[in-house]
Amino acid sequence: MKIKTKYIKDKIKELNFSNFKDRQYIKDLLYIERLLSIDAQRWGYAGAMKLGFLKEEHCVDYHEIYEELDPKGHKKEYENETDRRKERNETAKRLRQIQDKEDEEFKKEWKKAGGRE
């Protein structure tokens, strides 16, 4: 298993091979590195799921490794991720506004039917 990124090499210098958690952490980083180094079409469903899990588990590490392996690809993904986050926030805001309006209408009907606040 060849280590490609300086980031992972630097991490290894901070850790102990005899510590199981340290070894597992580096194996996770190497898995991220390996998946980011090959064509996404070759990942398959399981590889994509594993990468998604590892990306959540080791978010900072994922971005550091991706940045080192493919700066342009990382920048594009980061921008897309930011756009999706903004879009989700805007959608959530609109849904809250709709829910608030529906709640107000429901409250009026509730009172109209003789219910208490």
Image: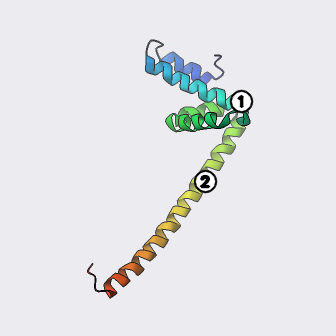
Nearest to the observer: residue 58 or residue 6: 58
Label 1 or label 2, whichever lies nearer to me, is: 1
Q: In the current view of this chain or complex, which residue is farthest to the top?
A: 18
Q: State which quadrant residue 72 falls in.
A: top right
Q: Amino acid at mark 2?
A: Arg
Is 42 left or right of 21, judged from the image as shown? right
Q: How many residues crowd around disc 2 within 10 Å: few (fewer than 14), some, or many (20 or more)?
A: few
Q: Residue at x 44, y 21 (%)?
A: 21
Residue 38's mark?
Answer: 1
Nearest to the observer: residue 37 or residue 82: 37
Q: Residue at x 64, y 23 (%)?
A: 5
Q: How many residues crowd around disc 1 within 10 Å: few (fewer than 14), some, or many (20 or more)?
A: few
Which quadrant of the rendered structure holds the N terminus? top right
Residue 95's mark?
Answer: none
Q: Residue at x 52, y 16 (%)?
A: 13
- Considering only order in the chain, which callout, 2 or 1, is on the residue closer to the N terminus? 1
Q: Amino acid at mark 1?
A: Ile
Residue 10 appears at what percent x and percent y? 56, 20
Taking 102 as reference, is 111 above or below it? below
Q: State which quadrant residue 102 falls in.
A: bottom left
Which quadrant of the rendered structure holds the C terminus? bottom left
Is 38 left or right of 25, judged from the image as shown? right
Secondary structure beneath disc 2? helix
Distance from Cα at disc 1 to Cα at disc 2: 25 Å
Q: Residue at x 67, y 39 (%)?
A: 74
Is 55 left or right of 35, judged from the image as shown? left
Q: State which quadrant residue 73 falls in.
A: top right
For disc 2, the marked residue is 84
Taking 86 as reference, is 15 above or below it? above
Secondary structure beneath disc 1? loop
Marks 1/2 in contact by CB < 8 Å: the verdict is no
